């Protein structure tokens, strides 16, 4: 019996480690995308609250400039206002977040309707 590992045993160990690294990297990447999406959802909900406050003060919903709407590194935030009576906020993925193919764009409106449902 020889002491130590053979080259075949070493290659098997390296293969197992490589497989584990690939699997865990994929799971980790998916969790990062979901975390960023959750942050964007929180931003949209905050903007919806600000929009309600703006309407109480001005009698209508405000546009992006009036609300001071800013985008993040991973999402572009927009608002569409229809004659000051309705609004729809959107979060559009950008940069690395476009890898979140299921939820590249999601929205919320003045009635708190959220689309697409799978992204919320």
Image (spheres, rainbow, N blue to C red):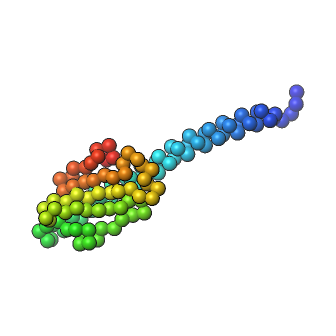
* Residue 39 in sight from this viewpoint: no
Percent across and percent down for residue 11 are: 74, 36
The residue under the point 76% across, 37% down is 10
Residue 3 visible here: yes
Query: Could you tell me residue 104's position as x and y percent?
Result: 37, 51
Q: Is residue 26 above or below residue 75?
A: above
Q: Farthest right residue?
A: 1
x and y, in percent, of residue 56 in the image? 14, 67
- Judge from the rendering whether residue 60 lies leftward or rightward of residue 96; answer left or right: left
- In the foreground, 40 or 93: 93
Q: Quadrant of residue 94?
A: bottom left
Q: Residue at 47% x, 46% y: name it.
A: 30
User: Quarter-wise, where is residue 52 in the image?
Assistant: bottom left
Relative to 45, is 30 above or below? Answer: above
Q: Is 6 located above or below residue 111 in the figure?
A: above
Q: Residue at x 25, y 54 (%)?
A: 108
Residue 41 to residue 71: above or below: above
Please tell me which residue is depicted at 61% across the width and 43% down the height of the picture: 21
Which quadrant, please, contains the N terminus?
top right
Task: Answer with left or right where residue 101 lies relative to residue 52.
Answer: right
């Amino acid at each position: 019996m020889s002491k130590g590992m053979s080259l075949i045993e070493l290659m098997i160990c390296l293969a197992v480690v490589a497989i584990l690294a690939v699997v865990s990297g994929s799971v980790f990447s998916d969790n990062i995308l979901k975390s960023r999406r959750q942050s964007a959802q929180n931003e949209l909900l905050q903007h919806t609250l600000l929009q309600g406050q703006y309407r109480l003060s001005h009698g209508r919903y405000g546009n992006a400039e009036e609300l001071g709407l800013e985008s993040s590194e991973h999402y572009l935030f927009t608002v569409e206002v229809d004659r000051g009576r309705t609004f729809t906020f959107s979060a559009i993925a950008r940069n690395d977040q476009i890898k979140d193919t299921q939820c590249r764009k999601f929205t919320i409106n003045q009635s708190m309707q959220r689309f697409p449902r799978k992204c919320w």
